[in-house]
Amino acid sequence: MIVKASDFQAEISLGQLEHADVIAVIDEFIEKYEPKYLSRLLGATLADELADAISQPEPEEQWKNLANMVKKPCANYIYYWFQRDSVSATSGSGESETETENAKRVSPIGKMIRAWNEMVDDSISVTEWAGRYFPNMNPDYRSDIFKRINQFGI
């Protein structure tokens, strides 16, 4: 994995990272959404090559550079989906809003939109940079990762 739970800081911070159960949930989101993001950004072949390369004890410099470049936009992508999932909880009677103690619930939509749009901008930058060094890169430009959103979902 390129993204770690500890990468969710500053504008994309996630609460209670000192709790193992919270980290476990975040790790599940990383495992699900990191490969999706990388495949859409780089193409399936290069995404697989990157995963293989960074799993080596001493990855080559080009792979380290690529991993560093995709970390931030990938974390923003995962943050968006984590927050989207956290808005409600599934119960036996359907979706419900969880109770909060000593706090007032507010919408995460503003932060989600900023994280998403920053991810889009960074994804474009990564493809421009990586295209010079990785000729087998095959981004899916039809993918949502290249489309900005606003509060109206457009």
Image (cartoon, helix red, strand yellow):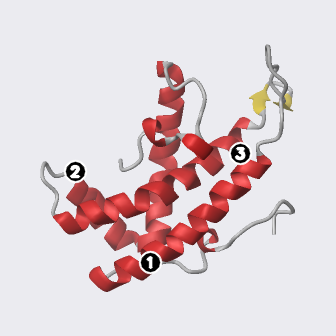
| In this rendering, position of residue 105 left or right of residue 141 | right
Tell me whether the residue at label 1 lies in contact with that at label 2, contact meaning CB atoms closer than 8 angstroms: no
Camera-side residue: 50 or 14?
14
Q: Judge whether residue 135 can be spotted in this image.
A: no
Q: Position of residue 149 (x, y in %)?
A: 75, 66
In the image, residue 81 lies at what x, y percent?
A: 64, 48
Going by the numbered disc 2, the residue's amino acid type is Ser
Q: Amino acid at mark 3?
A: Arg
Q: N-terminal of the two: label 1 or label 3? A: 3
Q: Is residue 151 left or right of residue 131?
A: right
Q: Which mark is residue 16?
A: none
Determine crowd level at label 1: few under 14, some 14-19, many 20+ residues with C-alpha closer than 10 A.
some
Residue found 52% across the figure and 35% down from its top: 26
**Residue plotted at (21% across, 59% down):** 53
Q: Say which of marks 1 and 2 sits in front.
A: 1
In this view, 86 is above or below 117 = above
Q: Amino acid at mark 1?
A: Thr
Please tell me whether mark 1 sits on a helix, a strand or a loop: helix
Which residue position is annotated with label 2?
55
Query: Residue at horizontal 22%, vertical 51%?
Result: 55
N-terminal label among 3 and 2: 2
Residue 67 visible in the shown view: yes
Q: Which mark is residue 127?
A: 1
**Alpha carbon of mark 3 to alpha carbon of mark 2: how far?**
30 Å
* Closer mark to the observer between disc 1 and disc 3: 1
